[in-house]
Amino acid sequence: MKIGNLDLGHLPLFLAPMEDVTYNSFRYMCKKYGADVLYTEFVSSEALIRNVRKSKEKMELYDFDRPVAIQIYGHNIDSMVYAAKVVEEFQPDFIDINFGCPMKKIIRHGAGAALLKDLPKMQNMAAEIVKAVSLPVTAKTRLGWDEKDKPIIEVAERLQDVGVVALAIHGRTREQLYSGAADWSLIAKVKENQRISIPVIGNGDLTSAQKAKQLYEQSGVDGLMIGRPAIGRPWIFREIKNYLDAGKLPEPVSVKEVVDNVKEQLQLNIKWKDNERNAILMMRRHFAKYFPGLPNFRELKIQLLRAETYQEVNMILDKISEIYFSEFIDYNNASLK
């Protein structure tokens, strides 16, 4: 699979862009466990126009990131063109346009998945961005707005026609948010469309190595994009690769490996954020997902989510390692809610 001149090999695995999730330390862990392509958190075009410091910090890239994309979102075409030019200065490998975020705070401004209700504007926005930058431009979107409005085949054709070089598709509508099953049959129809020659990347419900293999074989996509299932489980990339390559089910992960991983991610976060308390608060979403299915874990989980210093977190992690030293976490059977 190629994005522009970037050769990503056969069936690359992508880490989906996620706000407050795909910051640098988490990207590092996913790369360590086999993610082929990383995305930063998505960035608001209007924030870049206002020169918001936090938004620019999201776009800081490291050597380990490569290949990497920066994703932008917005409703105003001129603002999006300006944002793309700013992003280009940070030298990602490609720029991605967010046409799929379903969250109300994005939708109410006419950005993200809201553009699925105005395909001419979506196409024009993509065309102007492609013309404005020298980097390859890709896009991420959904099947459509709701059950009665799924124009994904037209979307793919329109975006390809104006120079978008790859398309990631989340197999749900905006109305579904993240509930219900992702419909990969429509993703397959995009891939099978004789008019479509650009790579198609499938996203949604890639919750296990077995599911990844099943959905890949069902759709024939060129790449797989993993989002929420990677939170608290960066080794899902390793599991999927091993299963696709060797056909073997992944071994359960030991609690010790999980603890070591959390410690490494936390240390990197503190180092790169240069503020211990903020670095810990940022990781709480990950803490909540890292230890599914352990018996009698509720009290330790509460302690972990309330800890505010590195020393506190470290002590709790050591306690977890001591109590559950012989335990393994089988993510395929554990409750991941």
Image (cartoon, grey):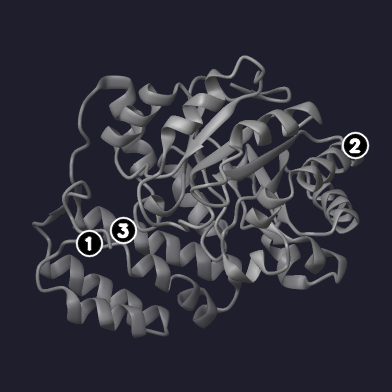
Kind of residue at disc 2: Lys
The residue that appears at 44% across and 61% down in the rendered structure is 265
The mark closer to the camera, 2 or 1, is 2
Q: Badge 1 local density, few (<14 within 10 Å), some, or many (20+)?
A: some
Left or right, residue 35 beside residue 139 = left
Quadrant in which the N terminus is drawn? top right
Q: Mark 1 points at which residue?
A: 292
Position of residue 97 in the picture relative to residue 291 (left or right): right
Mark 2 surroundings within 10 Å by alpha-carbon count, few (fewer than 14), some (14 through 19), many (20 or more): few
Any part of residue 222 in sight = no
Question: In terms of sequence position, does the residue under pointer 3 or pointer 2 come before the other?
Answer: 2
Q: What residue type is labelled 3?
A: Asp
Residue at image position (17%, 49%) is: 330
Identity of the residue furthest to the front in this view: 148
Q: Earlier in the sequence, mark 3 or mark 1?
A: 3
Please name which of the two marks, 3 or 1, marks the residue nearer to the observer. Answer: 1
Which residue in the structure is indicated by mark 2? Answer: 131
- As measured in the structure, the alpha-carbon distance from the residue carrying label 2 to the one carrying label 1 is 46 Å
Residue with the mark numbered 3 = 260
x then y, percent, for residue 294:
14, 64
Up-down relation of residue 247 to residue 140 (above or below):
above
Front position in the image: 128 or 234: 128
How far apart are the two marked residues, 3 and 1, measured between alpha carbons?
16 Å
Q: Is label 1 in a helix, a strand or a loop?
A: loop
Give coordinates of residue 211: x percent, y percent.
30, 36
Q: Which residue is drawn at 72% across and 66% down?
A: 55
> What amino acid type should be assigned to the residue bearing mark 1?
Pro
Q: Mark number for residue 2? A: none
Q: Is residue 313 above or below residue 199?
A: below
Q: How far from the left and from the top, in percent, is residue 268?
A: 50, 62
Give the quadrant of the C terminus. Answer: bottom left
